[in-house]
Image (cartoon, rainbow, N blue to C red):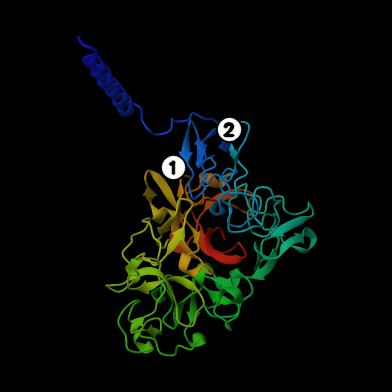
Amino acid sequence: MNARFITRALALLTLVVAFGCQAIVSSDPPSFVCSGTSLAACPAGNYCKGAGCSPCEAIDICDGFDNDCNGKVDDGDKNDRDKDGVTICGRISPTGEVVDRDCDDDDSSVNPLLPEVCNGKDDDCDGQIDENACAEDELCAPKTGCVKKATACDPTAAPPACPVNQRCDTATLSCVGNAVLPLGTPCVVDQQCGDSAFCAPSSLLPSGIGAVCTRSCCSSADCPNDFVCAPQGTGGNFCVSARALGRSAIGTATGGSACTANADCRSGVCDAKRCEEPCCDDSTCATGTVCRATSFVGSTHFTFGCAVKNGSRVPFSDCSAGNCEKGACSDFVEGSVCVSPCCGSVGCGTLDGDSVMCREVAPRSHAGDRVFACSLIVAGTSFLPMGETCTKASECRGNLCQSDQKTGTSYCSDICCRDSDCTGGLSCLPYASSGVQVLRCQRT
């Protein structure tokens, strides 16, 4: 074998080995095994996610990791919207439990690090309302605050705390008469209006009407003939005298129906050739329209009304530019998705094996107002029935465990639009939440 052949053979072997190694060895950087949440455990642009490194993300979600690589765990803006320093993620205790979780991230005066006060809210996020909020010689009246026992009636006292012809108002702890006033009549307390109605404060009704007896509604069909259903944003919809609103002529056409004049519509309002009417779901809207988030003529409130579809994106699909058929695109921790109206969590059903909860949301196109929509995933599908005794909010379908001033116990509650949305002997009544009145299933 001559020297030239040997030289060529060795050169060929060198090329084979070189190219073979290149084919076997990947150009990708080696994977990293890490623990904890330290950014130093991973290459630049990555964070430690359990047993390995993962590329940095735009949003820091509630998962115990530093998703956005800013050196802080679960601190994303959407996890602490009210900027009170307490997130909806909470923290992990030494025993492995999630604690100190903000139960109302839209209200900076509510979080588990604050004391409970007498105001009708769960200030300390323990699932109870107004517990131990007053001194021993005081009682808590949600509408007025702590009241001295010597000057207040006690609804739990025996014998009765008021004269035979009166009852103790649980909201103000004052004795009131039993006379039932008709809708639209000026009032002071709920008992004056009867069992199917309540006394709404002027702040809850259209300007200039004052405190009158009313009841909640989904559309004008729920009100007497000379009354219409007036939308008041998140506060709910209420039966108001048509004459008090300047609507002297009322027709019969339902929400979303074609019209040429105000007198054609049951609501007394024809706008853009369609009857304007609030709604709770599609069932009360005319063919070709849906119950979606919209604005109303002469009102600053953004609420749900009968109108043509706003877009093609269905509830819980991604959205970005107001393209939802129900008209409301809301920011979630996981991103922005379309939401639909609701009158309680039961009507929201389930998604991916977990329950969906009804709560206040701020549509991206109308950040100054809020609507009730199916908008929060709650793990599990088994909860205590509405009205059942509870000890913490997570036991209830609507994540609301409300204190009963009469018995000192708490019961499961939920958002509502009208009495028929409530079970367990509860009624749909105004309730102070985050500084505004909302409708919630309550004991009377």
Asked if one can make out residue 79 in the rendered structure from this viewpoint, the answer is: yes
**Percent x, y of residue 7:** 26, 17
Q: Nearer the viewer, residue 90 or 42?
A: 42
380 left or right of 153 in image: left
Could you tell me which secondary element the residue under label 1 belongs to?
loop
Is residue 111 found left or right of 395 in the rendered image?
A: right
Q: Which mark is residue 96?
A: 2
Q: Is 431 left, or right, of 314 in this rendering? A: right
Q: Residue at x 59, y 66 (%)?
A: 436
Q: Position of residue 59 (x, y in %)?
A: 50, 50
Question: What type is the residue that disc 2 sits on?
Answer: Gly
Q: Is residue 343 visible?
A: no
Residue farthest front in this picture: 3
From the image, which quarter does the N terminus lie in?
top left
Q: Is residue 306 above or below residue 297?
A: above
Label 1 sits on what residue type?
Answer: Gly
Q: Can you give x and y, in whole percent of width and height, for residue 399 in the image?
A: 52, 50
The nearer-to-camera label among 2 and 1 is 2
Distance from Cα at disc 2 to Cα at disc 1: 20 Å
Residue carrying label 1: 380
Q: Which mark is residue 273?
A: none
SS at mark 2 in the image: loop
Dot 2, crowdedness within 10 Å: few (<14), some or many (≥20)? few
In the depicted view, which residue is nearer to us: 406 or 58?
Answer: 58
Residue appearing at x 39%, y 56% in the figure? 347
Query: Residue visible at 53% across and 78% down?
Result: 182
Could you say which quadrant of the image residue 134 lies in? bottom right
Residue that lies at the very extreme toward the top in this rendered image: 1
